[in-house]
Amino acid sequence: MQTNNLLDLRRLGLLLKEEMSLQYLRYLLGLGVVFGGLFMIWWINAAGIFSTEKQQLEEFHYIWFAVILLCGGAFFSSLAFVHFGAKTSRLFYLNLPASNFEKYTAKWLITGLIYPLAIWVVYLIFSWLANKVNIQYTEGTPFAQLPAFGETTWLFMRIYFVSQTIFLAGAVFFHRYAIFKTAFSLMLVQIFLMLFVYLCARIIFPEMFEGWTAPASPNQVYQITDTFKDFVNNRLEQVLEYVFWLALAPIMLVIGFFKLTEKEV
């Protein structure tokens, strides 16, 4: 396949332009609802309606920024391929004069890059305005703003960049109620992994178990080597972090892309 048949920046730009021209009112309305909702929540907390004494909530920004970014992003990404919900819109989308790679890239750019940047900007504006209002009505008491490039802020952004790819792939797999089906699938995967670890433990340490439980530590049954102990105690967590940060997102993007390719066959 020629390169321009797989990725043409002009076609990709047209896809993004079409998406934004068709959905920009919905996007702007959603951002307005987010901004208004944040301001109402902050005002309720600032007025002390739910607390006996008026106080500043230091964790306010981190809690609500995480909720809107991660939970809202999961919902937004799950609607990326809403075209597949109806036969006519599905046929129209699959027959657009663009490659699968361009279609998937356009959706990823919107959900994986544009959305978090938009939420980041909106939240910074909100925190700045809330601080100004708080100073005006509380005799100069400031309301801590969200650190634009703070460590926790960037951590939430990095978590979103990874977790968003899961729900984007889920949007390709599930045509309706994608967010719920994706979350349920994640739960099934977690249960499967727990059962897999349990079965491996029963095979490797059979004498440790009495029935379904394991009352004894494997150290009391087998002489585990110091190398294995060091790996479990000091390196296993680091390996899992590398898998999450470096491998999970590419794997999910590849899975979602090939699933989209199957839909056009």
Image: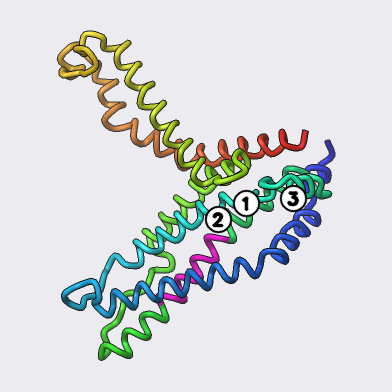
Residue 76, numbered label: 2
Viewer-side residue, 82 vs 124: 82
Is residue 101 rendered to the left or right of residue 151? right
Kindly identify which residue carries mark 3: 89
**Which is more N-terminal, label 3 or label 2?**
2
Question: Which amino acid type corresponds to the residue marked 1 in the rendered image?
Answer: Ala
Name the amino acid, label 3. Ser
Disc 2 vs disc 1: Cβ atoms closer than 8 Å?
Answer: yes
> Dot 1: within a 10 Å radius of its alpha carbon, few (fewer than 14), some, or many (20 or more) residues?
many
Mark 3 or mark 1, which has the lower sequence index?
1
Q: Magenta span covers which residues? A: 115-127
Q: Residue at x 59, y 71 (%)?
A: 28
Q: Are marks 2 and 3 in contact (CB under 8 Å)?
A: no
Residue at disc 1, secondary structure: loop
Please name the residue that numbered disc 1 is placed on: 80
Image position of 167 with respect to 238: above or below: below
- Whether label 3 touches label 1, CB < 8 Å: no
Question: What is the image's colouring?
Answer: rainbow
Nearer to the camera, 265 or 6: 265
SS for dot 3: helix
Q: Quadrant of the C terminus?
A: top right
